[in-house]
């Protein structure tokens, strides 16, 4: 039996026990991580340096890229380290820090995506009021609210999760520390507090999801009323990258946490968690740059001086 005072480290789930596959995973993760750093770094630098991109849409995209960089840097380097050196351990404080940072960044990511849906709604459905509703001060306030809400949410969950006594061992069935896996190690009935916090967080996330859906219903109705086909295509093309990112984020996240227990297994959980925690931050720059001429032009100017 373990208790919380005797746990000084946790053991993360390894992607493979074979040394050859571990090294293969290391190089794969390194490639994904470097691509995410390069892509998001270019978007951040291009938006910061090009005054033509100092608009609400790109301000929120800059926030999204910062959060994506942070979230993938919270989980993937430790997975790379464990694969390279054939280890599984993470310190108690390291696990708490990883859980806090990942929850904070991934929550803020979703809130920023929700704000970006509002930005597209105002731009297409109320273009004459765009400058009023999304002025620089309003944009800063909305971004600060997203970051602040995510920070408070993460602080409450982390403090409550790591205040529970642990008696179920120290093996975490995941390649990074997350709340459901830590709760499995708890032997206290007080985890009902965490369930209550999870209900509040899920309700908030569901409210954001409903807001995004309603925004796109209004956007679709407005786009269909545009008389010219070229105008409809131009209006919807500004929404497509955001819509793809939201769909990728929600689908992978929902499958990770809402899949039936009958199909759940450690290997499947590992793959699914990799999809929702690593893939969206890595492909975000690609999604936004492929269909956005302004971003491509800004990045090209940045690379060519």
Image: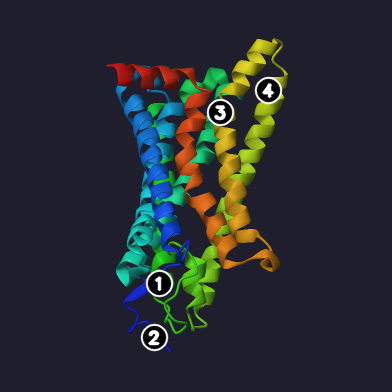
Compared across the picture, whether 173 is left or right of 42 comes to right
Q: Earlier in the sequence, mark 1 or mark 2?
A: 2
Q: Position of residue 160 (x, y in %)?
A: 42, 71
Q: Position of residue 296 (x, y in %)?
A: 43, 20
Please name the residue that numbered disc 1 is placed on.
11
Tag 3 secondary structure: helix
Please give the label number shown on residue 3: 2
Distance from label 4 to label 3 (Cα)?
11 Å
Please name the residue that numbered disc 3 is placed on.
120
Distance from label 4 to label 1 (Cα)?
52 Å
Q: Residue at x 64, y 13 (%)?
A: 231
Q: Nearer the viewer, residue 204 or 238?
A: 238
Q: Earlier in the sequence, mark 3 or mark 2?
A: 2
Distance from label 4 to label 2 (Cα)?
58 Å
Q: Is residue 287 above or below residue 148?
A: above
Q: Earlier in the sequence, mark 3 or mark 1?
A: 1
Please name the residue that numbered disc 4 is placed on.
222
Q: Residue at x 34, y 34 (%)?
A: 41
Q: Residue at x 62, y 48 (%)?
A: 251
Distance from label 1 to label 2 (Cα)?
15 Å
Q: Nearer the viewer, residue 145 or 263?
A: 263
- Mark 3 crowdedness (10 Å alpha carbons): few <14, some 14-19, many ≥20: many
Do callouts 4 and 3 mark residues in contact (Cβ within 8 Å)?
Answer: no
């Amino acid at each position: 039996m373990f208790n919380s005072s005797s746990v000084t480290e946790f053991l993360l789930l390894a992607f493979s026990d074979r040394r050859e596959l571990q090294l293969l995973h290391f190089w794969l993760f390194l490639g994904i991580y470097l691509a995410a750093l390069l892509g998001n770094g270019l978007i951040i630098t291009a938006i910061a340096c090009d005054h033509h991109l100092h608009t609400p849409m790109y301000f929120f995209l800059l926030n999204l890229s910062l959060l994506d960089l942070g979230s993938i840097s919270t989980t993937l380097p430790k997975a790379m380290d464990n694969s390279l050196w054939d280890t599984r351990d993470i310190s108690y404080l390291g696990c708490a820090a990883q859980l806090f940072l990942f929850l904070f960044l991934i929550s803020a990511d979703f809130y920023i995506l929700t704000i970006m849906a509002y930005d597209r709604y105002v731009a297409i459905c109320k273009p004459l009021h765009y400058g009023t509703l999304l002025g620089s001060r309003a944009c800063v306030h909305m971004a600060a609210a997203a970051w602040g809400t995510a920070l408070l949410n993460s602080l409450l969950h982390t403090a409550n999760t790591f205040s529970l006594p642990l008696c179920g061992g120290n093996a975490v069935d995941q390649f990074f520390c997350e709340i459901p896996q830590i709760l499995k190690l708890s032997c206290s009935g007080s985890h009902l507090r965490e369930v209550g916090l999870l209900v509040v967080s899920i309700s908030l996330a569901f409210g954001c999801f409903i807001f995004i859906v309603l925004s796109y219903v209004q956007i679709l109705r407005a786009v269909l009323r545009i008389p010219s086909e070229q105008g409809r295509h131009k209006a919807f093309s500004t929404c497509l990258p955001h819509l793809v990112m939201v769909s990728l984020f929600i689908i992978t996240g929902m499958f990770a946490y809402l899949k039936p227990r009958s199909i759940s297994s450690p290997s499947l959980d590992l793959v699914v968690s990799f999809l929702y925690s690593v893939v969206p931050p890595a492909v975000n720059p690609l999604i936004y740059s492929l269909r956005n001429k302004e971003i491509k032009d800004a990045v090209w100017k940045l690379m060519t001086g």
